Amino acid sequence: MKRLIIDPGHGGTDPGATAFGQKEKDWTLKMSLYQYKRFKELGVNVEMTRYEDSTLNPVARISRVKNRADICISNHFNAFNGSARGLEVIHSIHASPRFSQIVADNLVRQTGLPFRRVFSRSLPNKKHDYYFMHRLTGSTQTLIIEYGFIDHPLDNQYFKHDSQFLRAAEAVIESVCIELGVTYLAKQVTTQVPSLQVVQKKTLRNEDKKESDSKRNSYVGKILQSVHKGQLRFYSRPSWKDEDVFGYMTEGQVFPLINKKVRVGKGDQYQVQNRRGEVYYVTAHPEFVLVK
Ligand SMILES: [Zn+2]
């Protein structure tokens, strides 16, 4: 089965482009996490270079991509001087522009954002790619997608609306699925992404109902912290399987909210959520996690 890696550009101490109070690193992570979840749903073998707002130097980023996938989608938002706008897809000098053009065309069709260009760029010697995501990623075919200009008022406005943001995300998912030979099933993206507060309220209301005649469990609404010395797995669904691992918590790291406890096989997991309202599952074993 063909493999995909999604690379949310920048992160941690590197905000990328910034404008109108927004940071590129947040938009690339939001785009990538959504695409990651959708690709998982669609049965694609997918990984990400980073799963949270962490700093990734070029060497670390490359090591997570090089020869590890057939396709890498490196998500970015452009910035110039406030007057440029539109979509760009950048491919390696060694790759045909065909796939990049397909991705760009579908983005333009689905979003209505202006097309800017599909291109490649070499170092002055003409032998090597200018961008390290192309030059140093081996056999992986990397596309750098610049979804628009964060510092252009119209592009910025477009991506401030979640429904439009997700339309762009879906356009890329569709093109990549076709390239990977995976059936793409469309998702209604007219609904808004729920904010953390909404998810929290809804979840707690459900808990209220379920536990109306029993005492509210003491962990609901609390913080979950990893007290495990190594890397503690967290899952995209209630599961202990390797394939459902979404990421790893380091010692001391927290999820700000526990929603509930669920029975998974012979053990318990907490359903937790992060600040963006995304829901994951972590072991509830007190040897590994602390509720506070
Ligand atoms: Zn960037």
Image: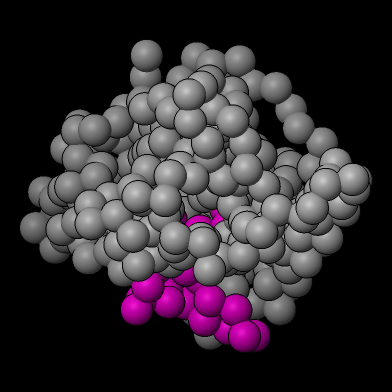
Left or right: residue 120 compared with residue 159: left
Counting from the top left corner in percent of width and height, residue 57 is at 22, 65
Residue situated in front as seen by the camera: 274 or 175: 274
| Among the 4 quarters of the image, the one containing residue 41 | top right
Left or right: residue 123 compared with residue 22: left
| Among the 4 quarters of the image, the one containing residue 109 | top right
- Please tell me which residue is depicted at 59% across the width and 73% down the height of the picture: 150
- Please tell me which residue is depicted at 79% across the width and 43% down the height of the picture: 189
User: Is residue 239 in view from this perspective?
Assistant: no
- Please tell me which residue is depicted at 64% across the width and 85% down the height of the picture: 20
Indicate how the structure is coloured in the image.
one colour
Q: Residue furthest front?
A: 214
| Among the 4 quarters of the image, the one containing residue 60 | bottom left
Residue situated in front as seen by the camera: 193 or 80: 193
| Count of residue discs | 0
Residue situated in front as seen by the camera: 105 or 140: 140
Q: Looking at the picture, does residue 225 appear above or below residue 264?
A: below
Residue situated in front as seen by the camera: 67 or 34: 34
Is-magenta flag for residue 18?
Answer: yes
Is-magenta flag for residue 44?
Answer: no
User: The N terminus is located in which quarter?
Assistant: top left
User: Is residue 197 in view from this perspective?
Assistant: yes
Left or right: residue 113 compared with residue 284: right
Tell me where the magenta segment starts and ends, as one range: 6-31
Counting from the top left corner in percent of width and height, residue 49 is at 34, 49
Q: Looking at the picture, does residue 5 appear above or below residue 286?
A: above
Left or right: residue 156 compared with residue 88: right
Counting from the top left corner in percent of width and height, residue 11 is at 39, 68
Counting from the top left corner in percent of width and height, residue 185 is at 70, 22
- Please tell me which residue is depicted at 62% across the width and 43% down the height of the picture: 261
